[in-house]
Image: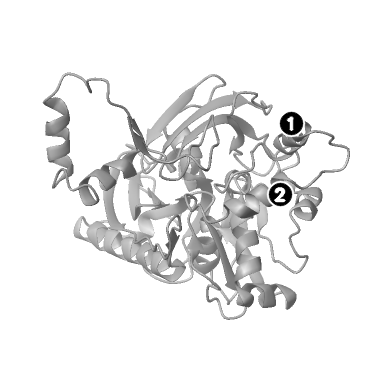
Amino acid sequence: MSKIHNLICYKKNNTQKSMSAAEETFVGAIDEGTSSTRFLVFSSKTHMPVASHQISTTNISLHEGWVEQDPEDILMKVKETVAVTCEKLKMMNILPSAIAAIGVTNQRETTLVWDKYTGKPLYNAIIWMDMRTQPIVDRFMNKRIPNCHTPDEQKRHLQFKCGLTMNPYFSVFKLIWLIENVPEVAQAIKEERCMFGTMDSWLIWNLTGGVNGGVHITDVTNASRTMLMNIHSLRWDKALISFFEIPSGLLFPEIRSCSEVFGRMTDGPLIETPISGCIGDQQAALMGQMCFLAGQAKCTFGTGCFLLYNTGRKPVISTHGLLTTVAYKMGKHTDPIYALEGSVAVAGSATKWLKDNLCIVDSYKSMEVMADSVEDTNGIHFVPAFSGLYAPYWKSDARGLVV
């Protein structure tokens, strides 16, 4: 089942085009991940996928520890996956107009800035695993917060407000780097034309019209990964924005729930189809695994590894290195549901390193055969700290080891 399908399928009764009761309707899901972009279509009757198309994404690494992607390339690939999937539907005698609604799920923390008037990115998207911002993190770790007298007290204060810990992983430090190192960004902020957002914001703004009335929004799950949203009020926090010295001219997206009609597609085969769901990919996986009750959890092994544990309507602040995040909010007038998260930066991507960098194997299939050929590792351990260590250690200076 699609990670986002449960989020939006119940919207179909309010958004589907006029059809007879006998006609089947479908739900579309844009899944923009770190390694690939795909579009899937699910039957609202069987909840099973009927068509999809997937395209690999391309990372840009200008320096060691830097990971970027081209925002326009990602947008083009999203549109291509939608178009190809719709052609597959037609071959099955299913019209694209049978898709009642679309949801968007995306790689989190990845940070983008673009020009409000031209629609052009002011820099590449800085990907969540990028490590260039460690000096900025160090600087703010040494900055005092009023009424916080010790480093631990300051850490707890920030964690209570935003649920996160200071680490290059989170969006605010990528944003600060852009402001301080890309003159076009600083100038655009002064002229109040610099739009900021995570990947969901960029996609939804473009898909709903871009410079011609595109909707500049994000949802609570993606906003909760920026370190600028208060996890209690679900609003951009003025004190956090001030602490991190974000200029006032920056254009923030409006924070919305995960499930409401944000806007409609303005071109392509799904023109006028409503976009009615938005959620970060790991929270989407939590929903896709039906973890709707406090105490239920899921663990996803993708580019990284992410364990999310549903804690219910109240945020739980960890004292053991876990993150507090918004799991989902199902509509404007519903309570948010929270989760504890343990994040590991490198999981599936380590297999790519094994194949492409060490060249020990020539395919992923042969990797599995090799692993099955031995009973154990004979005491050898691999620490995949290519982007430092995340939970529960949060050691940005850690490096990959074979010991």
Residue 5 at what x, y percent from top left? 42, 42
Residue 52 at what x, y percent from top left? 28, 52
Counting residues from the start of the chain, the first of labels 2 and 1 encountered is: 2
Q: Say which quadrant the N terminus sits in.
A: top left
Q: Secondary structure at mark 1?
A: helix
Q: Which color scheme does this rendered protein use?
A: one colour
233 in relation to 29, above or below = above
134 in relation to 376, above or below = below
Q: Residue furthest front?
A: 403
Q: CA distance from mark 2 to mark 1?
A: 14 Å
Q: Which residue is mark 1?
A: 152
Q: Which residue is mark 2?
A: 140
Position of 204 with respect to 32 (left or right) is right
Q: Nearer the viewer, residue 82 or 286?
A: 286
Residue type, numbered disc 2 = Phe
Position of 342 with respect to 357 (left or right) is right
Q: Which residue: 53% across, 61% down? A: 204
Checking the image for residue 116, the label placed there is none
Q: Which residue: 59% across, 39% down? A: 330
Residue type, numbered disc 1 = Asp
Q: Are marks 2 and 1 in contact (CB under 8 Å)?
A: no
Position of 369 with respect to 332 (left or right) is left
Residue 347 at what x, y percent from top left? 36, 38
Q: Which residue: 32% across, 61% down? A: 81
Q: Residue furthest bottom?
A: 118
Q: Can the viewer see residue 51 in this picture?
A: yes
Q: Secondary structure at mark 2?
A: helix
Q: Can the viewer see residue 216 in this picture?
A: no
